[in-house]
Amino acid sequence: MTLAVRPLTRSDEADWRRLWRDYLAFYETEVSEEVRAIYFERLLGDDPQDYNGLVAEVDGRLVGLTHYLFHRHGWKIENVCYLQDLYADPEVRGQGVGRALIEAVYAAADAAGAPSVYWLTQDFNAEARKLYDRIGKLTPFIKYTRPG
């Protein structure tokens, strides 16, 4: 197995859509085609406020994705990095794809001078949490959102 992580490109759109659709399905949600199209364009844009996209390839086939964003933080001078989405095809899980994608985000954060990388997951995501417990630090924070 040859694993490579690289930036998302326009030619990846069909595979990216497949992976992101499956990611959203795992979290039991959907988005409109308008949101999907705008998000993909933002992932390819050069606005520093937009997300960045990386994909994982195994033997030339896209099998994973991650999206991340740099933003200001009230307790730090430097930006921090939020890892928004992370997904690996079920058939390649446990083979280092998720780890490689997270480590690529860590490297991007280091290159950008962002000392912190953080992400969220749902408590039922037991398989992914096994990886997260090895390469991240669980915090005591509980997330709330605005109702509606």
Image (cartoon, helix red, strand yellow):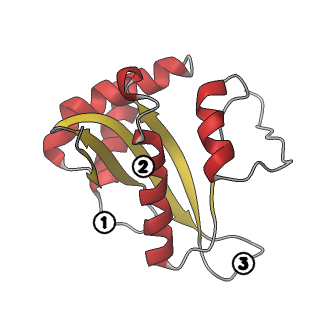
* Image vertical order of residue 21 relative to residue 46, above or below: above
Q: Is residue 34 left or right of residue 120?
A: left
Q: Secondary structure at mark 1?
A: loop
Instruction: Decide which of 87, 90 is in the foreground and name it.
Output: 90
Spatial CA span between label 1 and label 2: 21 Å
* Rendered image: mark on residue 101: 2
User: Which residue, given by chain and number where applicable, does mark 3 sit on?
Assistant: 76
Q: Quadrant of the C terminus?
A: top right
Which label's residue is closer to the chain start, 2 or 3?
3
Disc 1 residue crowd, few under 14, some 14–19, many 20+, Cα 10 Å:
few
* Image vertical order of residue 56 relative to residue 5, above or below: above
Hey, what amino acid is under mark 2?
Answer: Leu
Hey, what amino acid is under mark 1?
Answer: Asp
Q: Residue at x 15, y 39 (%)?
A: 60
Spatial CA span between label 1 and label 3: 24 Å
User: Which residue, given by chain and number where applicable, does mark 1 sit on?
Assistant: 46
Q: Select label 1 or label 3 by which is in front.
A: 3
List the single residue furthest toward the bottom. Answer: 77
Q: Select label 2 or label 3 by which is in front.
A: 2
Spatial CA span between label 2 and label 3: 25 Å
Hey, what amino acid is under mark 3?
Answer: Lys
Which label's residue is closer to the chain start, 1 or 2?
1
Q: In which image quadrant can residue 34 be found?
A: top left
Q: Select label 1 or label 2 by which is in front.
A: 2
